[in-house]
Amino acid sequence: MNNEFPQGFLWGTATAAHQVEGNNTNSDFWVMEHVPETVFAEPSGDAIDHYHRYPEDIAMLAELGFNSYRFSVEWARVEPEDGRFSTAALDHYGRMCETCLAHNLKPVVTYHHFTSPRWLISQGGWQSMATAEKFARYAGKVTEHLGDQIEAVCTINEVNIPRMAALMWMAGGEDESFIREAAQALHTTPEQFAPFMFAGTHQGRDVILAAHHQARAAIKAERPSLPVGLTIAMADMQALPGGEAERDRMRWELQDVFLEAARADDFVGVQTYTRERYGAEGNLGPQEGVEQTQMGYEFWPQATGATLRRAYEVAGIPMMVTENGIGTDDDGRRLAYYQSALQSVATCLQDGLDVRGYFAWSAFDNFEWMLGYRPTFGLIAVDRRTQQRTIKPSARWLSKVVQTNRLEQ
Ligand code: GCO
């Protein structure tokens, strides 16, 4: 089998501002991390200080041979108050793009990766249609500033994750005191509390998709040729006999609606970690005997190819794997995961699917949201006391694939 990747294929790693920069103090997440009854295992703090250390971090990624880097611009920094834009913050991201380009890394830039400015939440957040317009205004500004340096824009990261959270993880409503405190700290009410992750209603979904569509228009108005897409979290949703109807219902709610909304985009970013099995009663959880990751889901790298095929079937547009990886403290399992996941991508390419790039999640061990720093997804380890970076063997292995543009079998 020919495991060559196409010429010009984008090879990168991905990060998100809040997970790596540190001290994102004007964001809603920072507030949620610090209320007394917080559901966060620990606060993000200095994170891995990527805000200041990006020059050496980007140089490290370039040395490993990657030709692209996916990172996010932090809305809470760029627009610290409603309608007030920070040129200094925009310049910071401009310098990040320049550093990438100086190292032959093409910047793929995400405009929203879960975090929002505090003020947005006090105005109704992601349940309010006014947010779509505000997000588009911000997207236009960022594009005006950085548009010439960017390879592609991901407007909103994982447009479907609020729906996933509502239908799969937050159904119990057990975090009442957290929500009360966080709502108060963000100058809103528990009823109207809508940071991105908490906008899990159909209204929230409609606001998010409107924000994507309006942002796309604003970006195209600034720079018509810049490729624009959204990203979507996709598990390979499998049905056991009798579970087909439930699987199809959930797949419609959690994936297909969003893939259909992406049909007019330039590409869709597929982000895959595992599979989910459905029976007549719903999600069956991990199968006994199948290895689990630090996240408590199955080690199932072949999901990458399966979700690309599903995304192509429904959206029918070019694709990028904008995130793929594993939380593990056993780097040998990380290597095995990437090997098998990349084989499934290579097979998709051989079958004629239009896959333009692959971004490993993540470049560095980082802040895994509510779970804090315990799960380690990085190709590069970070000692957070010293901020010392150490390249893991899995990164060396991936580096070889990237530099030869070919996966040995
Ligand atoms: C997400 C995000 C990343 C995560 C990653 C690992 O998928 O939740 O895009 O921010 O860190 O997926 O869980």
Image (cartoon, rainbow, N blue to C red):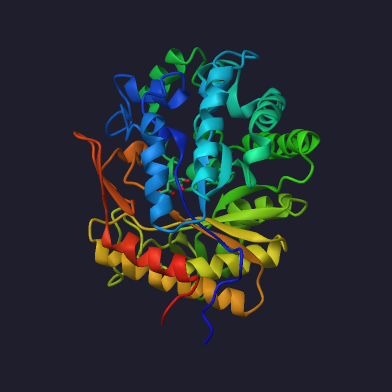
Give how far across and how far down residue 80 sits, in percent: 54, 16
- Relative to 68, say whether 133 is above or below: above
When the figure is inspected, residue 356 is found, relative to residue 78, above or below; the finding is: below
Towards the viewer: 20 or 301: 20
Q: Position of residue 361 (x, y in %)?
A: 42, 52
Which quadrant, please, contains the C terminus? bottom left
Whether residue 20 can be seen here: yes
Percent x, y of residue 103 = 49, 47
Label total for image: 0
Image check: 159 left or right of 55? right
Residue placed furthest toward the front: 102
What is the residue that sits farthest to the bottom in this orientation? 1
The structure residue drawn at horizontal position 44% and vertical position 59%, both measured from the top left corner, is 65
Left of 175 or right of it: where is 187? right
Q: Is residue 303 left or right of residue 209?
A: left
**x and y, in percent, of residue 379 in the image:** 33, 54
Q: Is residue 191 visible?
A: no
Dividing the picture into quadrants, the one containing residue 315 is bottom right
Which residue is painted at 73% across and 36% down in the image?
219
Image quarter for residue 366?
top left
